[in-house]
Amino acid sequence: MSDLKSFAYGLPKAELHLHLEGTLEPELKFELAARNGIELAEKTVEDVRATYNFTDLTSFLAVYYPAMQVLQTADDFHDLAWAYLLKAKENGVVHVEMFFDPQAHTSRGVPFENVISGYRRAAVRAQDELGVSAELILCFLRDFSAEYAMATLMEALPYKQWIVGVGLDSDERDNPPAKFAAVFTRAKAEGFFLTMHCDIDQVGSIDNIRTVIEEIAVDRIDHGTNIVEDDSLVELVKAKGLGLTTCPVSNSFVTEQMKSDEIVGLLRRGVRVMLNSDDPAYFGAYVADNYVALAEQAELTSKDLVQLAINSFEASWLPAGRRAAYIEQVRDYARSQGIDLPA
Ligand code: HPA
Ligand code: ZN
């Protein structure tokens, strides 16, 4: 392992932008298909990977959602999340806030209960067996109606203590944040933290980001690096201390580049950016690989990687005491690697 890679893997970090459904590796897809008696069009792992030629968010989502048909029982959801959590541990993740898409399952007849109980079981097990702290964020699919989102929120309320926040994902085109204003107002009133995807280079990116901050009043933004086009937005994000959950390798699949200039530019301007994997099974890179990829592309120093890891905790939804303890862990790691940090 290169020095950079072993440093990046060992660095304690939080992952804040990770779709559990995006961690479905082809091998597990075949195992679950066999378990549930589902016939897949692809016959080998190579066949599956051959379908991974994405040119934008829409073409990615067209491959992503159909794959989920193999997920049916609570055990299936547990096994998916558990496989990810083992990878997270290897990647130096000590805390993760994981997205899940209940409507991708309830819309095809799988009960909400199967989804949440399987994922929750894996999250509890991660703390007990791996020492990895794991929380769940319920995402609404923005190409479904606001009414269906609200009904999903109502269905989730009995499980409120298992869900730290709500998010918004899927296709941003023609589905602006304002469509879900009432759902997010209700979610906030129920005590959930709020985040929304502001995907890369969308039609109306800047307007949508402004709405997400000023009208929805989110606690964090997923992607959101298009703020570089508008200095007043950069200042607003800084003033509010909002975290931007960037995903460099994912960006290189759904656009033509990692957006390293944008990410690093924001880091240098003191915006709370950190690195995440998004859908690692599809983009071939778990979170530590994202640290390595951006470091190589943008010639980052190990001090920069330490700052990104500190940002990952500062932008997390952990209580202040735990956040501070994890940041101390990052600083101890940095010192143990001979990095000189200001006190
Ligand atoms: N954007 C929108 N929807 C998604 C994403 C994303 O990055 N990943 C999985 N679903
Ligand atoms: Zn995402």
Image (cartoon, grey):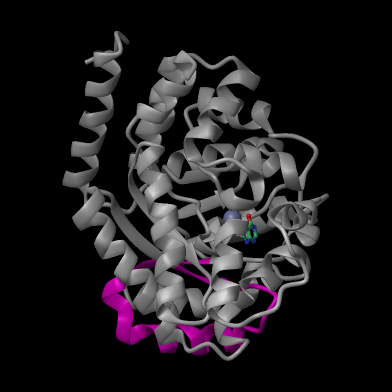
- List x then y, in percent, for residue 191: 31, 72
Magenta run includes residue 206:
no
**Closest to the observer: 225 or 288?**
288
- List x then y, in percent, for residue 289: 53, 33
Give the number of callouts. 0
**Closest to the observer: 63 or 247?**
63
Q: Is residue 190 shown to the viewer in this render?
A: yes
Above or below, 312 against 50 in this view is above
Occupied quadrant, residue 148: bottom right
- Residue in view at x 62 percent, y 72 percent: 68
Taking the image as shown, residue 26 lies to the left or right of residue 272, namely: right
Above or below, 339 against 184 in this view is above
Q: Is residue 172 shown to the viewer in this render?
A: no
- Residue in view at x 48 percent, y 89 percent: 111
**Closest to the observer: 132 or 227?**
132
Taking the image as shown, residue 328 lies to the left or right of residue 236, namely: left
- List x then y, in percent, for residue 143: 70, 75
- List x then y, in percent, for residue 113: 40, 86
- Residue in view at x 67 percent, y 53 percent: 199
Taking the image as shown, residue 95 lies to the left or right of residue 227, namely: left
Taking the image as shown, residue 221 lies to the left or right of residue 333, namely: right
**Closest to the observer: 341 or 248?**
248
Q: Quadrant of ligand 1?
A: bottom right
Q: Quadrant of the C terminus?
A: top left
The boundaries of the magenta stretch are 138-167
- Residue in view at x 55 percent, y 67 percent: 31
Occupied quadrant, residue 105: bottom right
Magenta run includes residue 145:
yes
Above or below, 164 against 47 in this view is below
